[in-house]
Each structure stands twice: as C-alpha cells, then as structure tokens.
Amino acid sequence: MLESVLSQINTLVYQTSEGMVHPGLSAGWVLFVLVSMLLLSVWLMRSVSVAAQPLNSGIVSVYNLPFIGKNIQRIITRPTVLTLLRIFTAAVFLLVIAAGLFGTQVAERNIATTLTWTLWWSGVVISVFFVGSAWCAICPWDAIATWLVRRKLWKRGSMLSSLNLRVPKIIRNIWPALGMFVVLTWLELGYGVTVSPYATALLALLIVVLATISLAVYERKAFCRYFCAVGRTLGAYGGIAPIALRPIDNAVCASCKTLECFNGSQDIEPCPTHLVMGSLKQNTYCTSCGACTQSCPHQNVNWQIRNIGDEITYSARPHWDESWFILGLLSLTVFHGFTMMPYWEDWMRQLAYLTGDSGRILTSFSIGMGVAMLVPVLLYSASIAWLQFIMGKQEEWRRVFSSMALSILPLAFAYHIAHNLSHLVRESQGFLSVIANPFGTDTLPLSMHEIHMRHMNPLVDDNIIFALQATLILFGFWMALKILRYRLPQLINTSGATVSRWVFVPMLLFISLISMVNLWLLMQPMIMRM
Amino acid sequence: MRFRDILVFISLFIITTNAIAHHVLGRPSYSLGEDSNTPPSMQVETQIGEYYVTYMAFPAFPKPGDAGRVNLYASRIDNGAPFDGKVTFKVRDDSFFASKEEVLGVQDIDDGVYRQGFVFKEAGDYIITAQFESGGEPYTIDFPLRIGEPFPIGPLGISISVIALLLIFVNITQRKRLARIKASQHHQKDQKKPTE
C-alpha cells in the first residue's frame, strides 16, 4: 500500500531529465516531512495562547566554557589571530582574481570558479548555522579596502584617509543591498558568471573597488552596513544563529559613559556599523569584527552560545527595509531552486520562442526572474492583507508586514542551506586537483567519464544528504510556526489574553505553501552546475 | 631469491607507473605546446536527448587569423549508431548583451565526423552552436571558444587606477580641509588676542 502511494507520488512529481543531474529527495522522506508538518500545524492551532518569552534560558558565555574558554577569550580580545586570518583570506582572494584573469577558462579546472561558487558561495550560508556572521570578520573585500584606505594592518587608521561623509538618507537602508543581491543572482544564474573564471575575477575586482570607494567616501563601513548583499544576508540569517556577540553584564554597559564599542579607542576602530553593545538586541548589522571585544575597557563583550532562533523569535524588531530584504531572500532562494530544475530550461525556451528572444535569452531569463520573484511577494502581501482583515485592521499595514516577515526567514534559511548542501557535497569533488593547479594550466574540460565518476561518488552518501535536507525543511517550518505563535498574539494584544485561532490561518497557509514548494524543489533532479 | 623477485617487480611497477603518468603516446606531455605539430585540442563530451555527443576544437587556444576546426561526433545512446543527417554550425559573440549570430556552415557526415572550419579575425569570447534535427526533435549544443588571450591588464589597470585616483583625491581634499581648519583656528586666536 505504502509502496503504491510512494510510486504514485514519484510519477506525479518527478520529471525525467537530460544530462547530468543530482538525484532529488526520495518520496519516503517527503512523506515524513509532510506528516510532521501536519502534526506541527495541529499543535499550533490547538495552543494559541500567548507564549511567554524565556528569560535568558540556555545562554552560555564562550569564556566560561571549560578548558577552551580562557584561550578563546585571549584570542578574540587581541587582534593577532583575526589579522592573520584576514591576511590569509585576502591572499586567497587575490589568487582567485589572478587565476580568473590569467588561468584557464575551463570553469571546473580554475580555482576562481570552483572556490568562489562551489565552496565559498555554498558554504558561507551554511557557516551561519554554526558561527553566525563570522565570515564578515575575515571578509577579504573589507580587509583589502581597509588596508588600502586606512593604510594600517589592524590599528585604527587616520581620519584623513576618508572623507567621512554621511551616507545620503535615501540610501541609508538596506535597499541597496537587496538591489545588489538581485543583480548578483541575475549575473549568477542568467549571465552565467559561475561558469566563467574571467567574469568571476571581474566581479571580485568590482566589489573590491566598490568597497574601497565606499570606505574612502563615507564614514565607518557603509559598504558593510548598507550595500553588501552577502553581509546583509549573513546578518539576516545571523538572527537564527546559535552564537552572537553580546555584553557579559548589561549593568556594566548601562553605566558606561565612554562607549568604546561605538566610538573606538586610540588603537581600535569604532563599530563599523554604528552599533552600541549595551543596546544590541539583534545581529542584523553585526559583522563580528571583534572591535568591541578589543576596545571595551571592562572586557565586557563576549561570544554567547544561545538557543537557535531565539533572537528572531523574541527580541528582533525588523524595519520596513529589513522585512523586504527577508522577503527578497525568500524569493531569490526559491528562484535559485527553480533555475536548476529541468522544467526551468523548457519554460525559458518556450518564452524565448514567444518573445523572439535568441542568443543567451537574457530577456526571457529576466522576465522569468521578475515573475518568479513577484509571486512570493504577492502571496505574502495577500496573506498579510487577509490577516489584517481578520484582525479588523487594528494594526498598521507596515507593522504587520514587518513583524510577520521574521516568521518566513527560517523558510528561506532552511531551503538555502538544503539547496547549497547539494552543491557543496556533490560538486566539490576534485577540488584538491584544482588546489594543486589553481590556474588549470594545460587542463581540459571534464570528460564524461570524470563527470560520471563525480556524479556517482559524492563526498557524502545520498541518504545522509536526503536526511539533512528533510530535517532542514522541517526545522524551517517548525521555527516559522514558533515565531508565529509568539509574535502574532504579541501583535494583536499585549495583555496575554487568548487570541482566536483563525488569526493564524493566513500565515500558516503561506508558510505551509512555501515549505511545500521548497520540498517539491528538493524532490526534483537538480542540474549539475559544473 | 623470492625477495629479489618482489623487489624487481615493485621497482618495475613504480617505473612503469611513472612512465604512463608523464608521457602521452610516447612523447613527454609538457612538449605539447601551441607550436607543436600536434597542438592540443579542446574536447567536450555531453549527453543530449537520445545522443551522446563529442565536440572537439583544434587548436584548443586559437589566435586571431589562425585557421581552426570543430569536429562533432554524435551517436545514439541506445545502440551507438552515428547520426547521419545534416548539422548546422553557427557562431555568436559571447560578450555582454551581444546576440548577433552567423551561420558558419551546414555539414554532411564525413567518415563518421562532422567537420567545420573557422577563422576568427578578432580576439574575444565566442559560442559555437551545432544544431541538428532527429526524430522531429531539434538538438542544440553550445560550445564556448576563446580566440586569443584574454585582456587581464585592462580590468586590473582600471581597478588600480580608480582606487589610486580616489585615494589621492581623498588625501588632497582632507589635507586641504585640515589646513583650512588650522587656518581658521589660527585666525580665531588672532581675533581673540586684542580683547585679552
């Protein structure tokens, strides 16, 4: 009976495809996730009273960890290790540029494309799950820009090195970062920069130039705060991360008059994104640079290990632009998945026939991308409008829109990691040979035999990947419901009274729909990138 | 005696393995440069629809004005029978937003291979497309081809120039601003003196 049901599901949702593809999630896992989602939905609808915010439960200071705590404290309160790591990432980044410009243009043989798109681009999002926005602390774009403009390896640079202008009000938000993310996605999936070492190197150079211009013209690190798509993505996801920089004792921060974390000290730079440690409630703009840990005269800043997702469930307060960024993340991650389905190529081909598009069919791709991004936005807006209608329009549209955006962030995060896991595990085979010959000198494209061998021998067994992907989708769904269960009653009333269960329906439907789309995307065979 | 046999076998094995690894058809592989009489080719193999296609370009890294050739082999995946219809070869510029396409030629099968010659006058990135029809289905295979060397100095030079000019501009502007502030402070001190 079960076999028959699974077989029916298989024939309904799987499409046979041409060429080399990664296998999709098996029907058994899908059934497990769907049943679990149903049970979680029932749990949500049955317990609709206002959930209480836990009082700092489960928070552990890294400094207090046995054996390693004091060593970690020594490392992060001094700039040596961080500076060495920045030098290392900058050196690798320069190698990527050199290999892209001077090396072979066979994508799978050049370190520029393999390291940038297969390892880094896939791995950096996964890293948030373990170390939050730690990547930003060793980001080579910022490191190189800082060394060029400040002309200091780690110490505070001269004020003369920058014009220190305020960022114009119109772009003092993360709309530019969202725009950059859309452009990067277009270049990645439409223009195909991922399979061009030369274009990858040009993009890397362009971003360093932009970061340098921003640092030389605007105060502090405007590029990191307002413009960087990667930084803002890590920042948004950082709210889910189990690790964050926070004060050890809030009372010390409350009585602090000098605010070295914000102003910097004689040697240490001020917070690059204008954060004050004492009032820090969310990770969105923290770049984990460690300036606050080094400058605080009271040694009152440390890394905290906390419950996953507690920040976005209880304490984060997203602004209008940040909620749009979250919605953009959701749209773009789902869109990523669509473009790697065999269906997508057929749809684009048909659209190109209709519009008379030829060559790279960039017009068709742009239309497809626009539509694919618009659909989740419209569905979310409709859910918010419905929710507002049920609430009797007590709350302002913007407030409901922003507050509920946090509940969809885990969906984007979970799918993003699940999707990237496929690339990382199934496409990073052979990377050692690229390290041995980073420029790919005298190499040829992968033969069919090599492609088959890579395809047949992923780094991790398929069943483990399936289990991780199914768990991630379920985790995203559970986290989304948890946020909804706390935030929606908070939005409606703060008195702690029980709210009608019907108010949960619009967002529950939206969250379920997106989770099922994500699940369906993971079931499909995914076209290998290189 | 037995030990000596094993030793000889291991020595021979190691020597033989090295010989295979470092030679191609008896010639040291590092001598296969662009100026060799057997220049390296760029080869791509792919599966498309019901066909297994091998695509080769000679030479692998042609220069502007060099005569080059593309060879295409297409055989059915199920029974290995070669495709024997006509294949159209097209070319288009692969630079940003370029979409102009030209037909290089339409070729018949010749000894199991489709051969298409080309000469590019200008360096750049191109896409060569082979198209054929089988069983009422159109087949299209794209193959990237780089003519001449890429221009690495251009983007590097532009980036370094932009950054250098910007930093010089910022430095001069800030020095002037500092000088203005100092002059203004000096001026204020001078104004205060008579009243003291």
Image (tube, coloured by chain):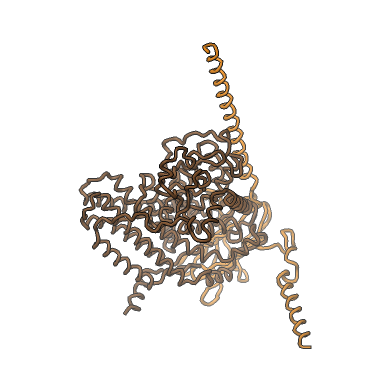
Chain colours: A brown, B orange
Q: Is residue A356 visible?
A: no
Residue at (67% x, 56% y) in the render: B62
Give residue A98's position: percent from left, percent from top.
63, 51
Is residue A268 shown above or below A127? Answer: above
Residue at (35% x, 75% y) in the render: A6
How many numbered circles are shown?
0
Q: Is residue B49 visible?
A: yes
Give residue B154's position: percent from left, percent from top.
63, 44
Give residue A460's position: percent from left, percent from top.
51, 70
Rendered-image quadrant of the N terminus of chain B? bottom right
Quadrant of the rendered image containing residue B17: bottom right
Quadrant of the rendered image containing residue A241: bottom left
- Front in this rendered view, residue A133 or A169: A133
Relative side of A206 to A235, left or right: right
Is residue B140 shown above or below A297? Answer: below
- Front in this rendered view, residue A203 or A104: A203
- Front in this rendered view, residue A361 or A157: A157
